[in-house]
Amino acid sequence: PMASGGHAETDLAMLQLFGCAYLDDLLDAYNEASPLAGGWRERVGIHQLVPVLLHCVLFGESYVGLALSIARRYA
């Protein structure tokens, strides 16, 4: 684990992207401590796109399909 000073939505998007065993519990606690802006779930992909693109560069084409899928949602 590591601390992040980034945007709350980016934090949550990364947890979802890379897997979090207790994501629903964490989301509830996060939202209770600092309510999330309406529509945040619709913006998750936007916060995930750059890290997924970086994975395309670093790890190859196995991430291209995911990157295209995310980008198409916002095209």
Image (tube, helix red, strand yellow):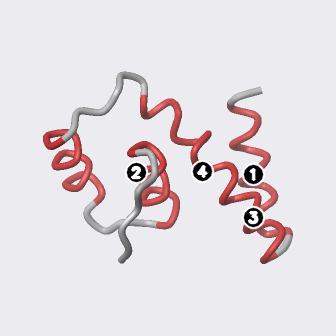
Q: Position of residue 12 (x, y in %)?
A: 40, 51
Residue type, label 4:
Gln
Q: Relative to residue 75, is residue 44 drawn left or right?
A: left
Residue type, label 1:
Ala
Q: Can you name the residue that lies furthest to the top here?
A: 38
Residue type, label 3:
Leu
Task: Identify the residue at image location x=67%, y=49%.
Answer: 49
Q: Nearer the viewer, mark 4 or mark 1?
A: 4
Dots 4, 3 in contact, CB < 8 A: no
Label 4 – label 3 distance at C-alpha = 10 Å
| Label 4: few (<14), some (14–19) or many (≥20) C-alpha neighbours in 10 Å | many
Residue at the spot of label 3: 54
Q: Earlier in the sequence, mark 1 or mark 3?
A: 3
Q: Nearer the viewer, mark 1 or mark 3?
A: 3
Residue at the spot of label 1: 67
Dots 1, 3 in contact, CB < 8 A: no
Q: Earlier in the sequence, mark 4 or mark 1?
A: 4
| Label 3: few (<14), some (14–19) or many (≥20) C-alpha neighbours in 10 Å | few
| Label 1: few (<14), some (14–19) or many (≥20) C-alpha neighbours in 10 Å | many
Task: Identify the residue at image location x=78%, y=55%.
Answer: 65
Residue 66 lies in quadrant: bottom right
Label 2 – label 1 distance at C-alpha = 18 Å
Callout 3 secondary element: helix
Task: Identify the residue at image location x=35%, y=26%.
Answer: 37
Dots 4, 1 in contact, CB < 8 A: no
